[in-house]
């Protein structure tokens, strides 16, 4: 059932990342898979293994990707599907499941609560429960991705794979190492939730960009497989994940969710080094980005790279003064993004006002020149991220 439904996703050269980390790196772009992630492979394999047992309908608990994959697979097989997701699951993933004809239940705040609810309605109504990762058929389905990697990279030396519940990492490791045992397979977890790395499971809701791999406990099936087949496990923090997502967008024109980008984060942060010889394959496991996250990622990146200049100024509260301030920035090529007056909560003269403004600039040095232009025009102006009363202009 897997053949003919899934797409054979491309293997792409990671030119910018290879230059940055000093190795030969390629991307397995599974973020371009139908339903946006590798999960379709395991869902199709599970429904095929159920056979007539799926006729009454299937149900699962999911953070989003497995749910929409199961919904797609169920529609393909012509069986009903229900999905339980944690409250606050990315809207893009929830709506995608509904668009494939599934009934979606939002339950609790954690994946464990969603899975427990799905199991309860499976027992009550005789539906077939399809685990998101902890199932041998699901693991086997995810292993088809590993076979593609093996076939497409002749000089494969290492594979960097996202690790959440363990279905993908176990399936990929078994497939590849059974054929070429010397290939190193490295699992990557988000530090916010890294049980396979030996961290204590977090309590309550896990807040991470890598929500798709925020699984608190190793699986009964996948846990022993991860212990046996993976060579090592590393973790990456939220800043590294955010940077990896932006790097993929900006340098490779690839849209990856946080969980799918952790392999890139591991290489860029130094948690993983590329293989000294042969190729390192980074699996981009999913592309279902919550669109609400993207503007924040872009703002963060522009500020960190110096392409967004945020300033605070004290100006006379008189007609034309704000226009002159903005003209001082415009005259050297700064493009105004937003501006606001602040009159409350500051020690201002009765004829003064505070101004917060953001500008798009070409980089840190360009921002410094624009600041110098405003200072030369007689304005008291500071970078918003530097102590007020002191301005350092970097030449």
Image (cartoon, rainbow, N blue to C red):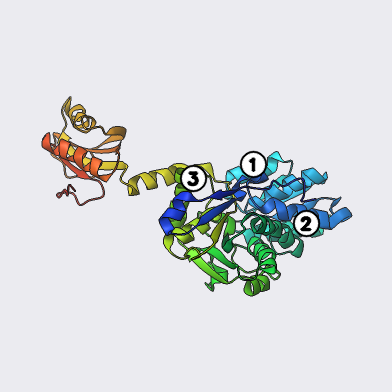
Disc 1 from disc 3: Cα separation: 27 Å
Give the crowd class for mark 1: few <14, some 14-19, many >=20 residues within 10 Å: some
Circle 1/circle 3 CB separation < 8 Å:
no
Count of labels in the image: 3
Number of other residues with Cα within 10 Å of mark 2, as a class: few under 14, some 14 to 19, many 20 or more: many
Mark 1 falls on what kind of element?
Answer: helix
Q: Which residue is mark 2?
A: 46
Residue that label 3 marks = 252
Q: Secondary structure at mark 2?
A: helix
Nearer the observer, 190 or 170: 170
Using the image, determine if residue 68 lies above or below residue 108: above
The residue labelled by disc 1 is 95
> Which mark is nearer the camera, 1 or 3?
3
Q: Quadrant of residue 21?
A: bottom left
Residue at x 16% of width, y 40% of height: 372
Closest to the camera, between mark 2 and mark 1, is 2
Tag 1 or tag 2, which sits nearer the N-term? 2
Tell me: residue 4, above or below residue 271: above
- Asked if residue 302 is positioned above or below residue 107 in the image, the reply reads above
Is there any visible trace of residue 207 in the rendered image? no
CA distance for labels 2 and 1: 23 Å
| Left or right relative to 393: residue 289 | right
In front: 1, or 375? 1
Q: Is there a contact, CB below 8 Å, between mark 2 and mark 1?
A: no
Above or below — where is 323 with respect to 267? Answer: above
Looking at the rendering, which quadrant does residue 306 occupy? top left
Q: Residue furthest right?
A: 52
x, y percent for residue 332: 21, 32
């Amino acid at each position: 059932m897997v053949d003919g439904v899934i797409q054979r996703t491309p293997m792409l050269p990671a030119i910018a990342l290879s230059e940055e980390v000093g190795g030969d790196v390629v991307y397995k772009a599974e973020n371009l898979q139908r339903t946006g992630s590798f999960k379709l492979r395991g869902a199709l394999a599970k429904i095929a293994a159920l056979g007539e047992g799926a006729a009454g309908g299937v149900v699962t608990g999911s953070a989003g990707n497995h749910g929409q994959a199961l919904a797609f697979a169920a529609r393909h097989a012509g069986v009903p599907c229900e999905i339980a997701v944690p409250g606050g699951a990315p809207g893009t993933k929830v709506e995608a499941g509904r668009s494939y004809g599934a009934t979606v239940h939002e339950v609790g705040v954690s994946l464990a609560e969603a899975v427990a609810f799905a199991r309860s309605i499976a027992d009550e109504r005789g539906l077939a429960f399809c685990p998101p990762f902890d199932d041998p058929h699901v693991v086997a389905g995810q292993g088809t991705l590993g076979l593609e990697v093996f076939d497409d990279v002749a000089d494969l030396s290492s594979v960097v794979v996202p690790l959440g519940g363990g279905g993908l990492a176990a399936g990929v490791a078994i497939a590849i190492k059974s054929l070429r045992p010397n290939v190193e397979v490295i699992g990557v977890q988000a530090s916010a939730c890294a049980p396979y790395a030996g961290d204590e499971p977090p309590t309550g809701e896990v807040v991470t960009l890598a929500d798709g791999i925020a699984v608190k406990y190793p699986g009964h099936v996948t846990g022993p497989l991860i212990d046996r087949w993976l060579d090592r496990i590393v973790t990456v923090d939220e800043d590294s994940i955010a940077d990896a997502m932006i790097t993929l967008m900006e340098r490779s024109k690839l849209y990856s969710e946080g969980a799918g980008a952790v392999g890139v984060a591991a290489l860029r942060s130094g948690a993983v080094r590329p293989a000294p010889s042969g190729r390192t394959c980074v699996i981009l496991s999913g592309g279902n980005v919550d669109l609400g996250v993207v503007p924040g990622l872009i703002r963060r990146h522009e500020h960190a790279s110096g392409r967004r200049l945020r300033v605070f100024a004290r100006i006379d509260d008189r007609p034309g003064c704000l226009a002159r301030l903005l003209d001082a920035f415009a005259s050297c090529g700064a493009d105004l993004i937003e501006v606001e007056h602040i009159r409350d909560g500051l020690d201002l003269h009765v004829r003064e006002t505070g101004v917060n403004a953001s500008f798009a600039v070409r980089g840190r040095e360009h921002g410094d020149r624009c600041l110098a232009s405003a200072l030369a025009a007689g304005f008291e102006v500071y970078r918003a991220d530097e102590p007020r009363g002191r301005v350092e202009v970097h030449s």
